[in-house]
Amino acid sequence: MGSDDGGGGALDADITGFAIDSRAVEPGHLFFALSPEDYRRHCFTAKEFADGHKFIPEALSRGALAAVARRARIAADEELRRLQPRLLLVEDVIDALQRLARGVVAEWGGPVVAIAGSAGKTTTKDLTALVLQAAGKRVVKSLKNFNNELGVPLSILQMESGGRHAADFDVAVLEMGTSMPGELDRLTQIAPPDVAVEVCVGPEHLEFLGTIEDVAREESTLVRRLKAGGTAVLNADDPWVIGMRELHAGPVLTFGLSEAADVMAERIERVRLDLVRFRLRTPLGAAEATLPLPGRHNLTNALAAAAVATCFGIDPARIAQALALAAPSEMRGEVLRFAAGFTMIDDSYNSNPASLLAMARAVAEAAATRRIVVAGEMLELGADAAAMHREAGREIARLRIDALWGVRGLAQELIAGAREEGLAEARFFPSVEEAATALCDVLRAGDLVLVKGSRGVRTDKIVTAVKARFELKDE
């Protein structure tokens, strides 16, 4: 990191970690004071942003060695200027964070697996890391779903935090998201991929990206930014994704369930809601496998992970052993069984039409006395959001679903679409609190309930309310 003033001798000591939240600062950390100006220069869609410079004194008092701050912001603040010996002054703090991460990746020189797509990124990232670790690889992976211009560099900087060093890792598995044009381009500049995994293309962030064609174009950046000789891992079942093979002159490995692909699942047998048996076939052979996750879409995610493992020469038997130990990411298909005899799928982290329908199909295929889908409003879908909600409601009504409950805003259109298709039990709730109260009052043994919604709707509060009213079953 370059700073032509400030810093003093503070950085003669070893940096033990990195933070963008003063509350997370520990002794030895380097604190990045993000500002509204930085956010606006980069791909962030919120309307209001906090000024991290206000928290520099707190970060230093917690033991931060120094803070990275905007030069112009410090120049205008007499109190902060007094701290200048412990400040690194830059033009753009987010850019400084990214440049630092890019330098770590470049100096390390190990393989980067980058995972993108409109849905399933986090699960695919976790499954990929699980399989590679089971094969003896030392893996650094994205924290939680940290996949934006802050999350990717912070995930990389784990390699130089807490006493760890980049040389301690064999491979980086990074989730890369996009909500605005150019975001994936920025992320691939920070960590150029050796393996680029494109899971699927669907209607996401259309408010900022435009049309589905624009989404596909943005997602294809991952493939176009592959290193020379790198491998594109593409979903053969998704026409938008498989078309990206024309963008890469190097190796391509495909995965899929329906279309012919290099990595496939054969003889699929649904044992229960969250367990499927199948025969895994890869270019290195075949093996019997199980996956303890709900839904056909998660089997697709597992095949993507298996394709990455194949790039690293891992045989299918070892891949199968690892997949058998898979667990759902938090609020992404967690199956909760209650002592009262009903089951809930907590998929409340996020939602778009494609991911909602994928989970609704999983519910429709499962054994249950009554199948209920509780679906929150889907955000950032742009000008056609109402029509997309209404069509999703129609699609859900065509499945073997007994009840659809819509929560907040445009979820009214979900209900309207379901009623057009003749679904009798279709109800709308203006708030998650009202939906939670109503659901707790009607739950009974044999029910299977899916709870899903965009993060801003907070349908996870419905899951929390049910947990507060009913005891979970002892496994």
Image (cartoon, rainbow, N blue to C red):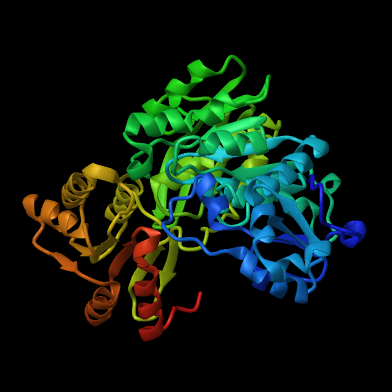
Q: How many marks?
A: 0
Residue 65 can be seen, yes or no: yes
Q: Position of residue 23 (x, y in %)?
A: 65, 73
Report the front residue among 410 and 371. Answer: 410
Report the front residue among 132 and 474. Answer: 132
Report the front residue among 96 and 120. Answer: 96
Residue 233 can be seen, yes or no: no
* Image quarter of residue 256: top left
Q: Position of 330 compared to 80: left or right?
A: left
Residue pictured at 65% horizontal, 45% vertical: 95
Q: Position of residue 373 (x, y in %)?
A: 26, 61
Is residue 234 depicted above or below 172 in this figure? above
Is residue 471 depicted above or below 411 in this figure? below
Is residue 84 depicted above or below 203 in this figure? below
Q: Position of residue 55 (x, y in %)?
A: 65, 70
Q: Position of residue 68 (x, y in %)?
A: 73, 57
Residue pictured at 65% horizontal, 54% vertical: 72
Residue pictured at 18% horizontal, 51% vertical: 393
Report the front residue among 297 and 389. Answer: 389
Residue pictured at 20% horizontal, 70% vertical: 429
Q: Position of 142 compared to 347: left or right?
A: right
